Image: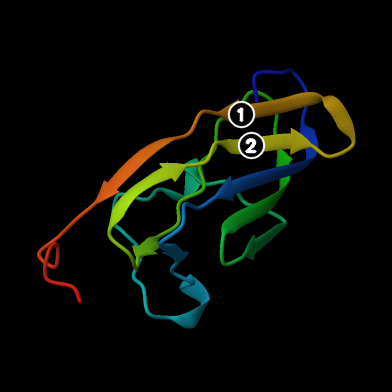
């Protein structure tokens, strides 16, 4: 948030490529990495984990940069297009951001050994 005011009602959507799944931390199967710092993380009001995307909603105070960190599991090898990440103030169409997507190539010891 490079503005001088808090931005409320931000909707951030991070779409996943095919072959990726979000690892749900609420199931208690993951551990928190030591390098994660609470002061750098965005304290969202609500987070929604779908099969194909992560949605986060909340307020970002003036002049701050925050992160959302989550884990994905790859379930299919191949070359995938990573969609762009988008954020917008839901009730102010003049405030929005988009980070360009990319490409991910997933391989492993199973390459060439699948049926």
Relative to 6, is 68 above or below?
below
Who comes first in sequence, dot 1 or dot 2?
A: 2
Task: Single out the residue that lies furthest toward the right.
Answer: 91
Relative to 96, is 32 above or below?
below
Relative to 113, is 93 above or below?
above
Residue carrying label 2: 86
SS class, disc 1 = strand
The image quarter in which residue 82 lies = top left
The image quarter in which residue 112 lies = bottom left
Residue drawn at (67%, 36%) of the image: 87
Point out residue 25 in the picture as x, y percentages from the top left corner. Answer: 47, 71
Within 10 Å of disc 1 (Cα), the crowding (few <14, some 14-19, many 20+) is few
SS class, disc 2 = strand
Within 10 Å of disc 2 (Cα), the crowding (few <14, some 14-19, many 20+) is some
**Image-based side of 106 in relation to 16, left or right:** left
Name the residue nearer the viewer: 13 or 114: 114
Per the model, the C-alpha gap separating discs 1 and 2 is 4 Å
Point out residue 111 in the picture as x, y percentages from the top left corner. Answer: 14, 62
Residue drawn at (66%, 52%) of the image: 56
Point out residue 93 in the picture as x, y percentages from the top left corner. Answer: 85, 27
Using the image, tell me which numbered label, if any, was put on residue 98. 1
**Image-based side of 35 in relation to 14, left or right:** left
Residue drawn at (74%, 18%) of the image: 4
Name the residue nearer the viewer: 98 or 104: 104
The image quarter in which residue 95 lies = top right
């Amino acid at each position: 948030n490079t503005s001088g005011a808090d931005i409320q009602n931000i909707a951030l959507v991070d779409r996943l490529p095919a072959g990726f799944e979000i690892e749900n931390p609420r199931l208690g199967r993951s551990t928190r990495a030591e390098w994660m710092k609470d002061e750098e993380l965005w304290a969202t009001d609500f987070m929604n984990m779908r099969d194909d995307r992560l949605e986060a909603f909340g307020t970002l105070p003036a002049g701050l940069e925050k992160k959302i960190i989550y884990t994905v599991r790859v379930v299919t090898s191949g070359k995938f297009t990573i969609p762009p990440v988008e954020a917008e103030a839901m009730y102010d169409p003049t405030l929005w951001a988009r980070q360009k997507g990319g490409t991910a190539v997933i391989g492993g010891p199973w390459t060439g050994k699948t049926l």
